[in-house]
Image (tube, rainbow, N blue to C red):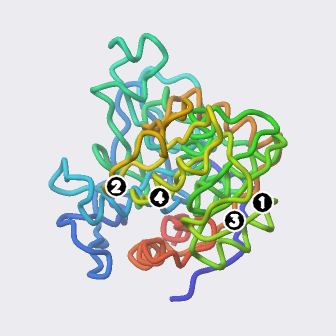
Amino acid sequence: MRPLLCYDARCRQPPAAVIKKTMKALVVRQPRPIEERPLELMELPPPEAGRGELLVRVRACGVCRTDLHVVEGDLPPVRDRVVPGHQVVGTVAGLGPGTSRFRLGDRVGIAWLQSTCGRCRYCSRGQENLCPDARFTGYHVDGGYAEYAVVPEKFAYPIPPSLGDAEATPLLCAGIIGYRALRRANTRPGCRLGLYGFGSSAHIAIQVARHWGCEVYVMTRELKHRELARTLGAVWVGDAAERPPAPLDAAILFAPVGRLVPPALEALDRGGTLAIAGIYLTDVPPLQYERHLFYEKNVCSVTANTRADGEELLTLAGEIPIRPHTTVFPLVEANEALRRLKHDGLEGTGVLLVESVAEG
């Protein structure tokens, strides 16, 4: 089936009067290559909202490379079966005991970080993304490739009314991770920033960076991604490992390709920082100290996000405003959407439309 294009939904869905007895969901039971279509369409009981939780009727769910890592087994399975998806936009269909932030019918988002312990040394110092007991949506708990999902109210995000359902989904992971990567790379207003890879996260990060007045240099192998980068304001675009024409103050590696770490470090100016934004990365080749790290060059990773990252990014998204580029698929075409993602066949972010299933 061909993807649906240019979907935009800014209207709020009224509160659901009746919650279905069963729901459609795409489930992975045995991770394997996406070309083998490992996601199975199943009928499951809808989840129930426990204390402090919201039941969300899913309207749209973004397709993320982390979903691909879950489906193909790059991230080791932690459950016998799981519903992937962690860039979820929907409406509150049920309120568990002890909830007070949202009302029935409110539009909310569910992101990758599903819960933390709230007590450990990392949570207490504002680094909840490093919590050893953190749980993640679409991995430890079922996610948004389904008609309904559950989220702790404290980890749900209000969605700005200026954003449609489909265009809001990538902000909940690609956007948040891109924003955190910008911060981790010490990106400053007006600096020279390099982006290696130009998929879902990078095409949002460039909009934030341009808002800050940065000169953005993009390195990517795909011609269509290069064209999108130019459209979004890149001052220079080259091949994935090509040396940019000016030394970089900051750089972000979005592509999960370890061999790009050395050329990215070589491209940094003295005192520059490279942030690696993926949850998965192939092996990094040996580094030479003087060539890659001397003159106080820095390299750091990005691990998940904090709720503060999400709140800041969503506020900024409404101010800029950020306009994600999306290619939309019906929920049942999730295998095809992930296959296209794997082979760089998407422009911007793939989004699964769930509302057509939920209302059909």
Q: Residue at x 56, y 62 (%)?
A: 197
- Gap in angstroms between the C-alphas marked 2 and 3: 33 Å
Q: Are marks 1 and 3 in contact (CB under 8 Å)?
A: no
Q: Residue at x 33, y 50 (%)?
A: 286
The mark that comes first in sequence, 4 or 1, is 1
Q: Position of residue 10 (x, y in %)?
A: 75, 56
User: Label 1 crowding class (10 Å Cα cut-off): few <14, some 14-19, many 20+?
Assistant: many
Residue under pointer 2: 285
- Three-letter code, disc 2: Pro
* 227, 176: nearer the viewer: 227
Residue under pointer 1: 234
- Three-letter code, disc 1: Ala
The mark that comes first in sequence, 2 or 3, is 2
Residue under pointer 4: 260
- Three-letter code, disc 3: His
- Gap in angstroms between the C-alphas marked 1 and 2: 28 Å
* 142, 11: nearer the viewer: 142
Q: Secondary structure at mark 1?
A: loop
Q: Is residue 273 visible?
A: yes
Vertical relation: 19 (above or below) 269: below
**Left-right relation of 316 to 55:** right
Residue under pointer 3: 325
User: Label 3 crowding class (10 Å Cα cut-off): few <14, some 14-19, many 20+?
Assistant: some
